[in-house]
Amino acid sequence: VPRVIIPNYIHTPHNCIITSKYYAVCCADACENMMAHLEGKIRAPHASPEVIADVVSEWLSASASSNRTLSAALSSKLNEIAEQNGGVVPLHGRLFAQWLHFVNPRECQYPHLSNTTSYEDKHEYRRKTGNAHAYSNGELYAIFGEGVSPEAAAETGASGSSDSNAAASVGSMCSEEGSADTEASVCSAMWEPLEELVDPVHGQAKLDQHRQGSFMRTCFRALVMLAVVASMCAILKDSVLGILTVSNKGPKGFAQADLPS
């Protein structure tokens, strides 16, 4: 059954109100609120999966009527993103945007791969295809319904059958209502494990700096541990030498030292 990704459809250019040739009025992107919360809390271009999971869970709990938590499938996908990016998750990349879509599929858009989709307004569509950009009610019922127009359905008493069928065909995607197996299979079917950073040059440089910094911190910790071990060995050596010196003198040496002059 053909499906429409709701947030992607809402934010397509043909749903904008073109008021002039300079700008258009479009629907607000509700996912930007979650992204702004993440950026305000993390204050870095990337973060560990644990930090992101905590911040997103906090946001979901505060914005939803019930206490929502991340499922095992979503946590696993977040860890996969980190594995592809040296242990951290870039906030401004395609994979994280894809993950946010599965976290909140009704507000966050699904990020298609570059050059795989194209958007055009109704004028461009008519110019390219020669067809109208909209269907009549009769055409819609003929395509998606029972082949009966609303007028004919009212006369025959068949009204509502197509609506119930359409409602039955609508499913949830990666939501907590479904079972864990269903959720994992749907997420895996739509998941594209290809990263695209918003700013590839500086974004990759930041990741390289993070990896280099992690390597330097690891080396520094190793040097500190070696210094501590060396210090302990030196102290132990001095203690052993002192004990050996005292034992070599023996009781005779102490007796001679105690004799009056």
Image: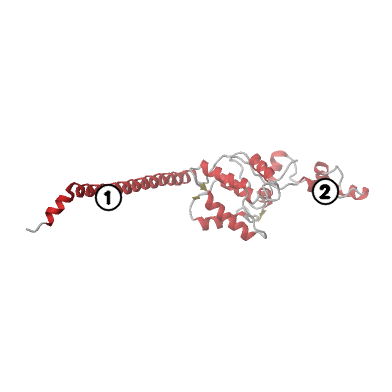
Task: Tell me the number on the disc at residue 235.
Answer: 1
Q: Nearer the viewer, residue 52 or 19?
A: 52
Image point 49% across, 56% down: which residue?
A: 43
Direction from residue 27 to residue 82 in the image, left or right:
left
Three-letter code, disc 1: Ile
Q: Residues within 10 Å of mark 1 (few under 14, many from 20)?
A: few
Image point 10% across, 56% down: which residue?
A: 259
Image point 65% across, 41% down: which residue?
A: 190
Three-letter code, disc 2: Ser
Direction from residue 52 to residue 125 in the image, left or right:
right
**Is the C terminus in the top left, top right, bottom left or bottom right quadrant?**
bottom left
Closer to the N terminus: mark 2 or mark 1? 2
* Picture coordinates of residue 77, whole percent (x, y): 59, 44
Report, in whole angstroms, how far the alpha carbon at label 2 lies from the one at label 1. 83 Å
Q: Is residue 37 above or below residue 163?
A: below
* Picture coordinates of residue 60, whole percent (x, y): 62, 56
Direction from residue 10 to residue 228 in the image, left or right:
left
Circle 2: element type: helix
**Is the N terminus in the top left, top right, bottom left or bottom right quadrant?**
top right
Q: Nearer the viewer, residue 154 or 74?
A: 74
Q: Quadrant of residue 184?
A: top right
Q: Nearer the viewer, residue 107 or 144?
A: 107
Circle 1: element type: helix
* Picture coordinates of residue 225, whole percent (x, y): 35, 47
Task: Tell me the number on the disc at residue 16.
Answer: none
Task: Tell me the number on the disc at residue 164.
Answer: 2
Image point 81% across, 46% down: which residue?
A: 165
